Amino acid sequence: MGENTLSELALADKSKASQAVEKLTKPAIWLFAATILGRLLGFVRESTLAAFFGVGPEVDAFIMAQTVTFILFSFLGTSIGTAGIPVLSVLYADKKVDVFRNVSLSLLHIVLLVLGVFAFVGYWIAPFLIHTIAPGFTEHQSELAIHLTRIMMPVTVFLGLSGWATAVLQSQSKFGYSALSNIPNNGVVIVGMFAAGFLGGIEWVTLCYVFGVAAQFAIQLPGLRQIRYKWNLNLKDADFMKILRMAPSTIATGLGTQINVVVDRFFSSGLMVGSVAALGYGQRIFSLFIGIVQMPILMVLFPKLSEHVGLNKDEEFKELIRKGLGILSFFMIPISAVLMFLAIPFTQILFERGAFDQAATVITASIVCFYALGLPFLSWKEFLLRTFYAMKDSRTPVINTSLLVSINITLNAISVPFFGVKGLALSTSISEIISFLVLYNILRRKIYKKTGKRMQLFPFMKSVISVIAMGGVMYVMCGMLGVNLLAISMDSKLVLTGETMLVLAAAALTYLSVALLLKSSEMLFCLKTITKMLSNQKRIFLPPKKVNKGWGE
């Protein structure tokens, strides 16, 4: 085969991968919009909690109770989508409707049985879990945390059901229901926080948290009408067994993520009062951008990656990996820089009111800054983990997660005596950087072994150059507006918000302009997609053109 033919085939594969991403862009944009609304409500929720309870012992107990319920959930709930989507998406693409339905129902019943047992056992061992995870708590804090953990235990089952619904819907490229699920969840919890603020007692918040997670599952039910319910649990089904064989790996990976959270809470519980809460608020700001930007991209690309592998489209699969990493770079690198620059103003605007004072702002902002350092690497790593699962490789993610946990624990033990609670965030970022580099190297070797071709480095340098220019403009703008990047602003909340918005606008304009000058492929792709969407919208609203027909027509 000649060089020209090979070149043409390579261009064709790239074109197909670009078309695949383009088809998924519209769902991703709707996901962005729904996720932004859900996350904004989430910040209203966190701001309300901060205003009524600050960073006191009650919030520490509440966050620790949340930690325990998420540990139990991670054993199966987080593995549902990761293990189920690679199998279900291929069944749906092959139009095996009955098999798809039966496998989905078998998965549902496994979720109910296993998580029901975990919730029952978790209720009785709550004292052991709290004393193990938070040994630094006072007796009053421990008793309150145990009480709240027991109230929260049904959350384990509802989160599992929500994960099952999300996996089934996303396998059918139905992304809207899962994106909307956070809206009723946050709405119910906000009501509970106001009730707790006026009636007293954080138990109200906890109860509404349970109802909110139940609503998160309930809102997805309309999308599951085609999965007509019947009892089905066929352990001899070959496709269902594929999910069960992959489940231990996805459970271990999810558990590893939760172990890191538990380790951080373990170390923070022995520091000054309020450290657990400050770490939690810092994670909220950090995870806001993960939820808004990273998760929609991963949600729409994961089923397509699985489909390419299932249908043996190796070249399209390889190009889709490169495209996905490039798109994540285009968004996450500038977000990371903005979070590091504006950590203090962001924290002041979002949380500083009521019981959340200036000292809490400084601690939380420093945590955000250190978390932001590892944000792009975390996004890349999460995408690569899904890539390995799409390839039916369940061993590599487990090994990588074990490495991540080991590094994080070691770095926590070293950094906490020197940096306090800030050291926990720094350790997490360094762990994510190392984890990504190891995973990316393994993936490149694996693809070379399979296809005989080396995978090109994904595009990120143009994003880095654009961010450097953006950083310079942000520094100048902050100096002109008097926004102090290293200390608390004495301006009113309204003035500070306006100044921060101006800095953000200048930063965005600079980043996009430089990316356009550098002819960033991700920038051009986004422009093309937005132009196409606007053109389609215009076509919808404009009246059809009249066509003058000739006499003979």
Image (cartoon, rainbow, N blue to C red):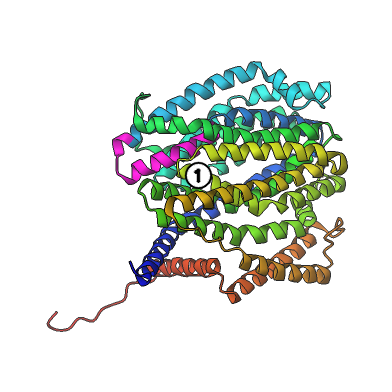
Say if 340 sits above or below 38 in the image: below
Our reading of the magenta stretch's main secondary structure is helix
User: Where residue 335 sits in the image (x, y, percent)?
Assistant: 67, 58
User: What amino acid type is highlighted by mark number 1?
Assistant: Phe
Residue placed farthest to the bottom in the image?
551
User: Where residue 281 sits in the image (x, y, percent)?
Assistant: 74, 43
* Tally of numbered discs: 1
User: Where residue 414 sits in the image (x, y, percent)?
Assistant: 82, 39
Query: Is-magenta flag for residue 84?
Result: yes
Is residue 37 at least partly visible in the picture? Answer: no
Residue 327 is drawn in which quadrant? bottom right
Residue 50 is drawn in which quadrant? top right
User: Where residue 190 sits in the image (x, y, percent)?
Assistant: 66, 39
Say which residue label 1 marks. Answer: 388
What residue is at 32 percent from the left and 72 percent from the top? 544
Q: Nearer the viewer, residue 218 or 430?
A: 430
Tell me the element at label 1.
helix
User: Which of the image's four quarters has the N terminus?
Assistant: bottom left
What residue is at 50 percent from the left and 44 percent from the top? 388
- Please give the range of residues in magenta: 77-99
For this view, does 281 lie left or right of residue 164?
right
Q: Nearer the viewer, residue 499 or 230?
A: 230
What residue is at 74 percent from the left and 45 percent from the top? 282
For this view, does 265 lie left or right of residue 323?
right
